Image: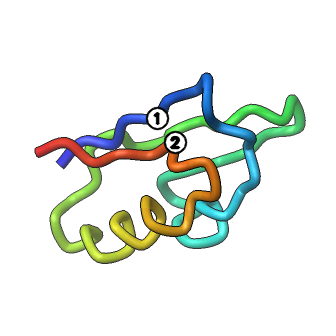
């Protein structure tokens, strides 16, 4: 699984960071950074939750 972020849509709300701080980080510059673009499959449920809860639907998972 690979995380893809549409940075044109992303508003850096940090909801994804709250769910998975080991994968997503919103820094002081107010931009989202993906710390791990290919998390292991045991993180799939959390990643799917981050996709669902993103208010701008800016996160996608690719297999």
Of residues 51 and 20, the one nearer the viewer is: 51
Residue 44: percent from left, percent from top = 25, 68
Residue at 29 percent across and 76 percent down: it is 45
Of residues 36 and 3, the one nearer the viewer is: 3
Compared to residue 31, the image places residue 61 above or below, namely below
Corner quadrant of residue 41: bottom left
Residue beneath disc 2: 58
Residue 5, numbered label: 1
Question: Left or right: 10 with respect to 6?
Answer: right
Indicate the secondary structure of the residue bearing disc 2. Answer: loop
Q: Is label 2 or label 1 in front? A: 2
Q: Residue furthest right?
A: 28
Indicate the secondary structure of the residue bearing disc 1. Answer: strand
Residue at 54 percent across and 68 percent down: it is 53
Disc 2 crowd rating (10 Å Cα; few below 14, some 14-19, many 20+) is: some
Compared to residue 41, the image places residue 45 above or below, namely below
Q: Residue furthest top?
A: 8
Question: Left or right: 58 with respect to 39?
Answer: right
Residue at 29 percent across and 70 percent down: it is 43
Is the Cβ of the residue at disc 2 closer than 8 Å to that at disc 1? yes
Disc 1 crowd rating (10 Å Cα; few below 14, some 14-19, many 20+) is: some
Residue 17: percent from left, percent from top = 63, 60
* Sequence-first tag of 2 and 1: 1
**Rounded to the nearest whole Å, what is the CA distance between mark 2 and mark 1?**
6 Å
Residue at 24 percent across and 42 percent down: it is 2
């Amino acid at each position: 699984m690979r995380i893809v972020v549409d940075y044109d849509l992303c508003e850096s709300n940090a909801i994804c960071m709250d769910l998975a701080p080991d994968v997503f980080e919103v820094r002081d510059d107010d931009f989202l950074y993906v710390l791990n673009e290919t998390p292991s499959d045991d993180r799939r449920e959390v990643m799917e939750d981050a996709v669902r809860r993103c208010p701008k639907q800016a996160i996608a998972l690719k297999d």
